[in-house]
Image: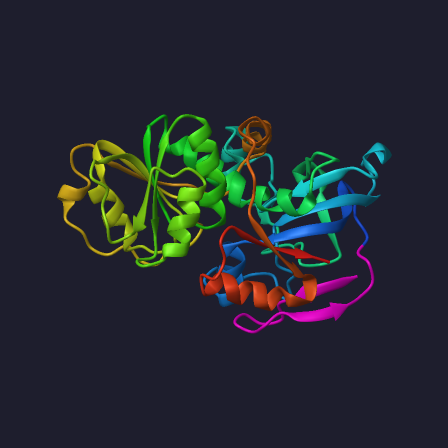
Amino acid sequence: MKAMVLESVGTPLKLVDGPDPIPGAGEIRLKVEACAVCRTDLHVVDGDLLHPKLPLVPGHEIVGVIDKVGEGVAGSRLGSRVGVPWLGHTCGHCPYCVAGSENLCDQPQFTGYTRDGGFASHVIADEHFAFDLDADGDPISLAPLLCAGLIGWRCLKKAGGRRRLGIYGFGAAAHIIAQVAIWQGREIFAFTRPGDKEAQDFARSLGATWAGGSDERPAEPLDAAIIFAPVGGLVPTALRAVRKGGRVVCGGIHMSDIPAMPYELLWEERELVSVANLTRRDAEEFFPIVKSAQVRTHTKVYPLEQANQALDDLRAGRLSGAAVLVP
């Protein structure tokens, strides 16, 4: 097995050759076809998310074919194409799991954080957290759906049925969920880094009604906003942009500190909520919608050995859409 391994937080990934992993009871092994690169991978590598498993293979937007199964897994799954997301395992018995909120599980495992992920030629996954994917689909196009798409979908649901939707940070998640929202009949207002004309043009090309810098405001108040950029300073900015009774959804797993702000920004029944992880139910809802909405992911492909370059490009904001590693 080849893998790009994080040996110490804050250091570049290292290419390692080793034996192919063996799945245990209830597990499957995938021969990885593609693994998208997520901003959460940056948070893990850079140390924003504490206490990762070390050494660690990052990556949690994995598409692959099952080539070996562990005890208790049906042999009929061999040869199936599946996707493995961020949420890699839940306990199944804590109050959150019992209540159907497995994304809030008290004893979760996360792919590419507390268990090895998909920056590799092979990966082990819990069979119950591997979603069946279209055997005829393009694995490179499918990979960003496993986190950017699923988290985007959960954020869109949290935003409710509101029509005028602002999106702060127009990267991988935003470019996917904007297509879904437009298909639903919503208007998209895309907010990028100030002066990032390329990202603004990209948003308009996908059908955004308006695109501008995060230091700008549209002519009319928004009904809701989703913040994908990990910038706490955008919270008061987004609250200023939404109407009375509007909602702001924070979609990232990590965000810089939210600055002090006057209560009047939250007053008039504006709401501020966060999204944590995902559920298997989200995937059951989302993948049929991807087909109906004819979502097209925009990707830049890197060979596995260039994972550090892909992370650098994401860190520097040099990507439109999503980076995808191919072993």
In the figure, is residue 126 to the left or right of 39? right
Left or right: 14 in relation to 20:
left
Residue drawn at 50 percent across, 61 percent down = 314
Q: Quadrant of the C terminus?
A: bottom right
Most frequent secondary structure within the magenta stretch: loop
The N terminus lies in which quarter of the figure?
A: bottom right
Residue 258 image point, x, y percent: 28, 54
Q: Is 17 included in the stretch rendered in magenta?
A: yes
Q: Which residue is drawn at 83% across and 39% down?
A: 79
- Scheme of colours in the image: rainbow
Residue farthest toward the right in the current orientation of the protein? 75
| Position above or below: 43 against 157 | below
Q: Position of residue 37 (x, y in %)?
A: 57, 55
Q: What stretch is highlighted in magenta?
A: 1-21
Q: Position of residue 95 (x, y in %)?
A: 50, 33
**Viewer-closest of 126 and 177:** 177
- Position of residue 113 measured from the top left corner of the image (x, y, whole percent): 58, 56
Please tell me which residue lies in front, 207 or 8.
Answer: 207
Between 74 and 227, the one nearer to me in the picture: 227
- Residue 251 makes an appearance in the image: no
Q: Is residue 116 left or right of residue 227?
A: right
Q: Is residue 299 above or below residue 145?
A: below
* Residue 252 lies in the magenta stretch: no
Residue 194, visible in the rendered structure: yes
- Residue 254 vertical placement versus 157 (above, below): below
Identify the residue shown where x is 21% and y is 36%.
221
Could you tell me how many numbered marks the image carries?
0
